[in-house]
Amino acid sequence: MLILLAAIFLLHIACICLLLAATIHNAWWMTDTMSTDIWSRWILTPAGNWNYTDIPALYPKEYLQAVQASSVLACIFCILGLFVFVAQLYTLPKGKRFLFTGAFQLLAWLCIMIAASIYTEIFHKDKDPGWYGASFILAWISVCLTFISCITYFVLRKKTA
Amino acid sequence: MPSGLIPFPFHLFSFHHPSLSRNPSHTDLRGEQREIMLSVLALTSVVLLGIASQTTAIVVYTSWERHALVGTDVRLSCSFFSWQWTSPDVTFSWHYRPDGAKEAISIFHYAGGIPYVDTKGPFRDRMEFVGNPSRRDGSILLKNVDFADNGTFTCDAKNPPDIAGSPSHVRLFVFEKVPVQAGVITGAIIGVVLGLLILIVAIYYLMRFLVARRVFSLSMSKHGRKGKGKEGSQQKQALAVTDPAKLKAAASEKKKQESRREKK
């Protein structure tokens, strides 16, 4: 029982880490000399330095800000869910389910799925040279992990340790 | 002695405290200590102000950037902070350096109570003085801005005898369509979603609290009329209608839980 609890806790922490990495690290789209999105762009100068610049104005601004907002919201809900989980561990009566925590994870799943879907659908459709970077992959992995975590909380019941 | 010092209201601080004549109790002594501390604090701040007024220069404030649509009016605000009182010889002057040019041209001057507006330069017939020098405001209004008005505007204010200080710049950007500023939509979405969440949680807990209070008041009234025959039985019947529903629900949940636990 304790191992199960530790595993679920670690899964939740992993979700938080992946979500934070996907949100903060500007590497949703990469080329040889550029690492970009969702907040700004890193450009590798011929001298070998990385310069921190703004994302060009030709990006559809509303969609970019929607991606920013939903990935930040996903992080917030996941972190809040962790605290709610710890609180529910102590306050939930025996036999009940962790519904509140599951609800937060569900919201986090929805938000990161919205962010990743919008980014996949709207940006870089015109065969730009380059490939999807680490943050993009982490975002999609977080979609799966938060979904698994959410289902786990909805199914799990509290027993005495 | 500099003319700018504020006259200190010595008459408000008297060292003849009425409580000294009476028997000094514990609270009176503490009040006296507090008064002495306050007066010392006031004295030190006045001394510091006096020192400071000799050393700091005039500070001019403008916006950092102004964004405007083509054809609209733009108000460039300029204000200053000075330790001296606002003198009648206060002067404001605005200079303009177009984007890409090296030199700045003078476009506005206010001195001796009269504003002198540009009549020959790029802003002739388009500029108006909308400031209030007695309130330390030297703002100008540019009407019908165009793409050629992109550039840096510099405001310089002087308040004799406080004349040492650096002017302040404001950059004007003229757009065809005002772009969405970075982070506005992001912040709006995050704020609305979190606000809705907090609202829903608050409403949920409020509902639970109200229902619990209603149940509590019903049970209290039941206990109160325990002794009275018919009324008691009526109350019991009313409660019996509500209670079995709850008991049924609780029983079914318990059964489900037990069956699932057995399955596990």
Image (tube, coloured by chain):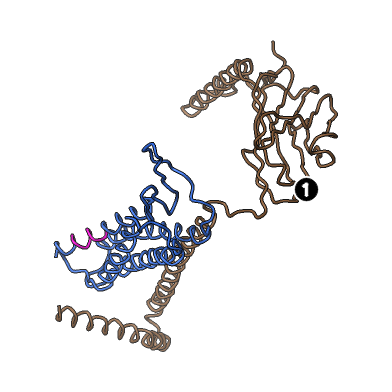
Chain colours: A blue, B brown
Tell me: residue A32, above or below residue B37.
below
Q: Is residue A94 left or right of residue B208?
A: left
* Quadrant the C terminus of chain B occupies: bottom left
Q: Secondary structure at mark 1?
A: loop
Return the residue nearer the eye: B185 or A3.
B185
Of all residues, the one furthest to the top in this rendering is: B1
Q: Is residue B226 left or right of residue B74?
A: left
How dense is the environment of label 1, judged by Cα within 10 Å: few (below 14), some, or many (20 and up)?
some
Q: Position of residue B106 (x, y in %)?
A: 76, 29
Is A160 magenta? The answer is no
* Quadrant the N terminus of chain B occupies: top right
**Helix, strand or loop for the magenta stretch, by majority:** helix
Q: Is residue B213 left or right of residue A159?
A: right
Figure quadrant of residue A71? bottom left
Figure quadrant of residue B205? bottom left
Q: Position of residue A45 (x, y in %)?
A: 41, 40
Return the residue nearer the eye: A157 or B31.
A157
**Subunit that carries the residue with mark 1:** B
* Residue located 27% across and 85% down the image: B252
Q: Position of residue B117 (x, y in %)?
A: 83, 33
Is A7 magenta? The answer is yes
Tell me: residue A8, above or below residue A45.
below
Task: Say which residue label 1 marks.
Answer: B144
Return the residue nearer the eye: B22 or A63.
A63
Image: magenta residue range: A6-12
Tell me: residue A121, above or below residue A37.
below
Q: Position of residue B80 (x, y in %)?
A: 68, 29
Figure quadrant of residue A110? bottom left
Residue type pointed to by label 1: Asn
Return the residue nearer the eye: B104 or B256.
B104
